[in-house]
Amino acid sequence: MFGELVMFSHTLFSLPFALISLVWAAEGIPSAYVLLWALIALIAARNGANAFNRLVDRKFDAANPRTAHRHLPKKLLREREVVAFVVVNFAIFIFAAGMLNPLCLWLSPVAIVLICSYSYTKRFTWLCHLYLGFTIASAPIGAWFAVTGEFAFTPFVIGTIVMLWIGGFDIIYATQDIEFDRKTGLWSVPQAFGLNGALLISRGLHTIMVFLLLFLFFLQDLGWLYLLGILISVILLAIEHNIIKPASRKRMNVASYNLNQVISMVILFCTLADYFL
């Protein structure tokens, strides 16, 4: 149930980009030590943040027919159990960060504040989707720090790609709750700009994302396999934007989640194949 609570399968959104960042930072396969602790830190931080979000949003989830089936509204898990889960995961995250290097350790509390603060943004700004992407962008940036212990330009480009990508498809997902958000006073791009405006903004974010992926092609001196990954991703993004139907929960899950999990894996495999082959 905890795996369902934090939607563990959605780790595929941030993990592939973190792995790319690890490889580029290490200029090859990182050591088993760095890889182990970086993955532990990534998964623990993500689990803690998602569980924290469920705690903060439990009253809204209970009032929304689309989310009323979730674990806290249905009392399948108790609040104190979820609080304990959050604390344990963040403790693991801090420990794992400390096992990597001093920079990761010192930045770990900042990361926790960053990823937890997202849970409140829908209460006051329609930029919440981009802020969600911004928090998830910390995965590839943190992965780079895990290897080098230093700041660099490339991981922030990767992070911006993740931010735009996540923000774009989170807007698509939020189109299901336009009326609920307006009724309850929650903020979102669909609530502020309507269905058509929201979808236009989502397409714009994904377009910029593709251009930044192309920018990485030149920045990292990549080859045709990487370009193939971008081409496949563009096709999948086009399919994603063409099957959107807010009234169909199945279609929205495919558009917002399933296709994007494929996109991240395509980019990962093509990037690594291009780098090593």
Image: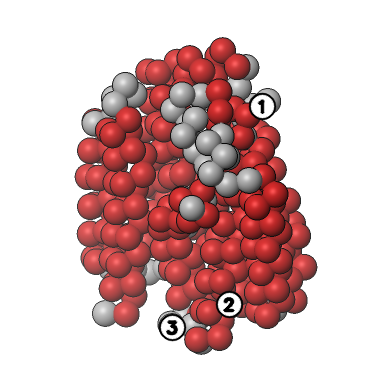
Give coordinates of residue 256: x percent, y percent: 36, 39
Q: Amino acid at mark 3?
A: Ile
Mark before the other along the chain sequence, 1 or 3 = 3
Residue at image mark 3: 29
Q: Is residue 165 above or below residue 33?
A: above
Residue at image location 25% in from the left, 45% down from the top: 236
Quarter placement of the C terminus: bottom left
Comparing 161 with 244, the one in front is 244
Give coordinates of residue 180: x percent, y percent: 51, 18
Residue at image mark 2: 37
Residue at image mark 1: 123
Q: Amino acid at mark 1?
A: Arg
Give coordinates of residue 197: x percent, y percent: 42, 19
CA–CA distance in space, label 1 to label 2: 34 Å
Q: Is residue 232 left or right of residue 89?
A: left
Q: Count residues near mark 2 (Cα–Cα under 10 Å), then give few for <14, some for 14-19, many for 20+.
A: many
Q: Is residue 95 above or below residue 131?
A: below
> How many badges with numbers are in the image?
3
Q: Is residue 7 left or right of residue 184?
A: left
